[in-house]
Amino acid sequence: MARFPGVDYLLIDSLLSEQEKMVRQTARQFVDEQVVPIIKDHFREGTFPKHLIPEMGRMGFFGANLTGYGCAEMSNVEYGLLMQEIERGDSGLRSFVSVQGALVMYPLLTYGSEEQKSKWLPKLQSGEAIGCFGLTEPMFGSNPAGMLTRAVKDGDSWILNGEKTWITNGSVADVAIVWARTEDGIRGFVVEAGTPGFSTSVLHGKLSMRASVTSSLAFTDCRVPGSAMLPGAKGLKAPLSCLSQARFGIGWGVIGAAMDCYETARQYTVTRKQFDDKPIAAHQLVQLKLADMITEITKAQLLAIHCGRLKDEGKLDPAHISMLKRNNVAIALDVARASRDLLGGNGIMEEYPLMRHLCNLETVKTYEGTDHIHALVIGERVTGVPAYK
């Protein structure tokens, strides 16, 4: 099987340490050997390759940039390169890893009690347990402050009522981090699968992210102990801080999807012959598309590396991440569309990864902050004026 050669027009590797390149190569080999051969079948059938979970845990993919409890303690650039390679395999697989680490392990580590950390983090890191993140609701996606899910104190317990939707891993999770409105503001709760009053349902009919489990969560007089509350998470800033962690990974991950599309198109155009028995890569319009693609991928790589360095220095804030996520998803979509165009009719065949990436990226553009919402975050940063309402 052919190994992915990488995409490096501007000597990007000169910006990386040997350790960073080793992390990337390890993940690249995993994707080449264990993801690429099977992912089109899972996408077609709408199934998640759950047999990969233990191996990803063993390799340290879950919570890779977190500290303690068995985590790999990677730098944020190393973590970004990991996300890049996993999404080169498939956005659904990267989404699984992102949710496990950034949206479940991160809030437990940052806001949880020692009891909560000790119980869940080792299991989540190893893949023995699966987690999900319950924030989005049927009526409130871009405006999480409007959430209707409520948690009411009842003696030493909390009673949860409400619904969450578009939840990655929801129906296969062993534990959910659930956000609810209380008299004391928005708080987070650790809710175990099987708790009476807590039910899940799978969302069917997706034409995107098909190799990913997407669910709804329902809470009907769901009673959890007082110890289920995340003690350090108070207000909307807590769940938004988790989303920042995940969005950072998305900004890196989509580069992998773009790289896969570009390299597929490049290889195709230098071997596909048309008109006077010339490869179509010899035509000016084809070279224009390839030049545009490699330029945008290179710019995305530079933006991601700079954001990763800033994050490692503690200088990256949510407005920076909005630019990273918004720009890189947009260029990845453009690259996927241009690549599909270069392959003509073959571009829609599952033999090639282009339509799968293209369909997936349409979802990635929308979730964890739409293109428009991130534009408003950037707009507020440069004007000082919020324009969300």
Image (cartoon, rainbow, N blue to C red):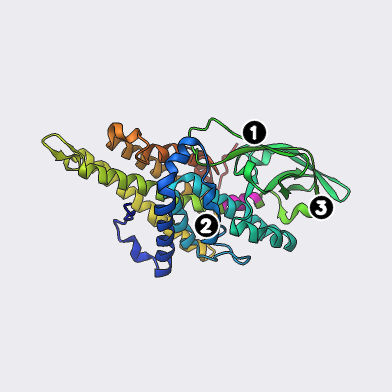
Write the start and end of the magenta stretch as one range: 239-244
Amino acid carrying mark 3 in the image: Gly
- Residue 21, by quadrant, is bottom left
291 displayed left or right of 194 = left
Q: Position of residue 184 (x, y in %)?
A: 78, 48
Question: Could you tell me which secondary element the residue under label 2 belongs to?
Answer: helix
Q: Local crowd at mark 1 within 10 Å, few (<14), some, or many (≥20)?
A: few
Q: Which residue is mark 2?
A: 55
Residue mark closest to the camera, 2 vs 3 = 2
Residue 387 in view of the camera: yes
Residue 193 image label = none
How far apart are the two marked residues, 1 and 2, measured between alpha carbons? Answer: 34 Å
Which circle's residue, 3 or 1, is located before the other in the chain?
Answer: 1
Residue most toward the right? Answer: 155
Asked if the residue under mark 3 is in contact with the one under mark 2, i.e. CB atoms within 8 Å, the reply is no
How far apart are the two marked residues, 3 and 1, measured between alpha carbons? Answer: 27 Å
Task: Name the magenta segment's main secondary structure.
Answer: helix
Q: Position of residue 387 (x, y in %)?
A: 56, 40
Amino acid carrying mark 1 in the image: Pro
Q: Split into 4 quadrants, where in the image is the C terminus?
A: top right
Amino acid carrying mark 2 in the image: Glu
